[in-house]
């Protein structure tokens, strides 16, 4: 069978889809990935055919959220959402044209991220099966509030309503430009309602979604949480400097903020240095724009490194709470300190804290050294480590990619 996967977002959106495409190829199918140009490194490493969609999410986020940035409280989650909506609305027509061209002859189109609505329209035009894929559980449920709502501030009785509210807001933010593109590119009639009946496949672990460790009981039959999508880095070899640093002492703390941009950089850097104190540490700047040259000698700066190789070699993972990083930290069996800044990061920070494998989330918009230091101490307790080991073992038993491929095959051949 032949598949097209399309997304637009950060590394955390693209990397799992590259792994899914690789798994589909290994199962004997054809698969191609469309995504932001800055996030296609994982596809190239996995030899997945890929092409760039128009737009530059990294450059746009850094330009819009630079300077004082999120960390100084001058940008809110809603501000980030407006930036993302503007990117999608600006490029919807181009994305739809590229998907229609690349999706010709495909059995199914896997749609995700900011490009999801364009992908659903492309599948409609081409007569292909549309399958939603993603790393954020947006299917309405009473088990938890929408991942885009602040955790712990919503009464449980309103959980399901928050999903409908957020999903409706997203649809209203994108529908006008989408309908213009549908008419111009495909000659399709305007879409008046949000899509709800297509299958949704989530590369997330059920053990993080509910206390029972299963996906929500009230999800419809077309929603599936199968486990994290990642390929083992068995053939990856560390640079000599990283290998030497790891061998030179105790397992270090990892500090990384992935694809997040717009931090209040000097303040973030000093707070991190003060909180880590004299511990050995690895630092991954990611898209943060932090000047790592000011770090003291106990820090070692690294480039993009496979989490499944690195995290088991660390003592604790300090991260922003993106879905992929949160899953990889739990999967490794060690504790976390989560410093959420925007979007669904607050949701995953709360899920890890509820699971007892992380300290209480630290305010990422106003990062204080004292708060981060206390969180590191709390996460370093023996009971947290024990729960992290147990939960990591459960997550490693999942077969997210294998199960995803099986479901996609059954959906497409039906």
Image (spheres, grey):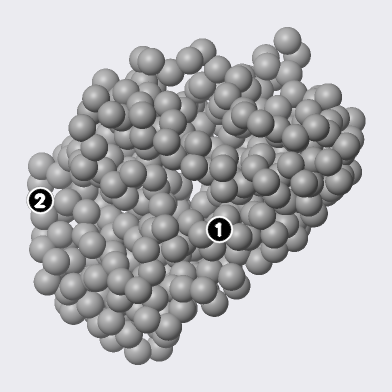
Residue holding disc 2: 381
| Viewer-proximal residue among 219 and 196 | 196
Question: Who's the residue at 50% across and 36% down the image?
Answer: 168
Question: Who's the residue at 64% across and 54% down the image?
Answer: 88
Report crowding for label 2: few under 14, some 14 to 19, many 20 or more residues within 10 A (C-alpha). few
Q: Position of residue 230 (x, y in %)?
A: 53, 42
| Viewer-proximal residue among 267 and 389 | 267
| Residue 179 relative to residue 384: left or right | right
Q: Position of residue 316 (x, y in %)?
A: 26, 57
Query: Which residue, as the protein is rendered here, is positioned at the far bottom?
Result: 294
Q: Which mark is residue 84?
A: 1
Marks 1 & 2, CB-CB < 8 Å contact = no
Q: Position of residue 344 (x, y in %)?
A: 39, 48
Residue 261 in sight in this render? yes
Q: Relative to residue 75, is residue 208 depicted above or below?
A: above
Q: Secondary structure at mark 1?
A: helix
For the residues labelled 1 and 2, the Cα–Cα distance comes to 38 Å
Residue 47 in sight in this render? no
Report crowding for label 1: few under 14, some 14 to 19, many 20 or more residues within 10 A (C-alpha). some
Of labels 1 and 2, earlier in sequence is 1
| Viewer-proximal residue among 99 and 388 | 99
Q: Nearer the viewer, mark 1 or mark 2?
A: 1
In the rendered image, the quadrant that contains the C terminus is top right
Total number of numbered discs in the rendering: 2
């Amino acid at each position: 069978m032949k598949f097209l996967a399309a997304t637009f977002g950060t590394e955390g959106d693209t990397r799992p889809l590259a792994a899914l495409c690789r798994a589909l190829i290994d199962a004997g199918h054809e698969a191609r990935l469309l995504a932001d140009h800055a996030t296609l490194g994982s596809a190239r490493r996995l030899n997945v055919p890929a092409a760039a969609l128009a737009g530059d999410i990294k450059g746009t986020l850094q330009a819009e959220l630079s300077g004082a940035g999120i960390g100084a409280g001058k940008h809110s989650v809603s501000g980030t959402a407006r930036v993302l909506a503007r990117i999608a609305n600006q490029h919807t027509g181009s994305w739809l044209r590229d998907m229609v061209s690349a999706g010709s002859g495909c059995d199914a189109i896997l749609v995700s991220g900011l490009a999801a609505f364009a992908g659903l329209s492309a599948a409609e035009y081409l007569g292909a099966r549309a399958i939603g894929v993603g790393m954020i559980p947006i299917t309405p449920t009473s088990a938890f509030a929408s991942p885009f709502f602040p955790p712990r501030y919503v009464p449980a009785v309103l959980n399901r309503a928050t999903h409908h509210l957020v999903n409706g807001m997203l649809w209203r933010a994108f529908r006008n430009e989408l309908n213009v593109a549908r008419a111009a590119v495909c000659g399709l009639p305007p879409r008046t309602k949000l899509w709800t009946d297509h299958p949704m496949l989530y590369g997330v672990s059920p053990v993080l979604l509910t206390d029972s460790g299963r996906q929500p009981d009230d999800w419809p039959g077309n929603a599936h949480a199968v486990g994290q999508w990642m390929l083992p880095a068995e053939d990856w070899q560390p640079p000599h400097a990283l290998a030497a640093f790891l061998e030179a002492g105790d397992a270090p703390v990892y500090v990384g903020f992935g694809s997040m941009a717009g931090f209040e950089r000097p303040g973030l850097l000093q707070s991190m240095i003060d909180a880590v104190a004299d511990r050995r540490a690895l630092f991954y700047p990611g898209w943060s724009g932090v000047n790592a040259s000011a770090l003291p000698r106990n820090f070692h700066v690294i480039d993009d490194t496979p989490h499944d190789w690195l995290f088991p070699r660390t003592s604790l993972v300090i991260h922003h709470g993106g879905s992929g990083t949160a899953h990889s930290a739990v999967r490794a069996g060690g504790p976390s300190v989560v410093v959420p800044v925007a979007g669904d990061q607050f949701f995953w920070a709360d899920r890890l804290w509820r699971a007892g494998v992380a300290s209480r989330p630290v305010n990422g918009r106003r990062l204080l050294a004292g708060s981060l230091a206390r969180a590191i101490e709390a996460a370093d307790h023996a009971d947290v480590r024990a729960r992290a080991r147990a939960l990591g073992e459960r997550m490693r038993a999942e077969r997210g990619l294998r199960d995803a491929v099986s479901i996609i095959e059954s959906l497409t051949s039906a």
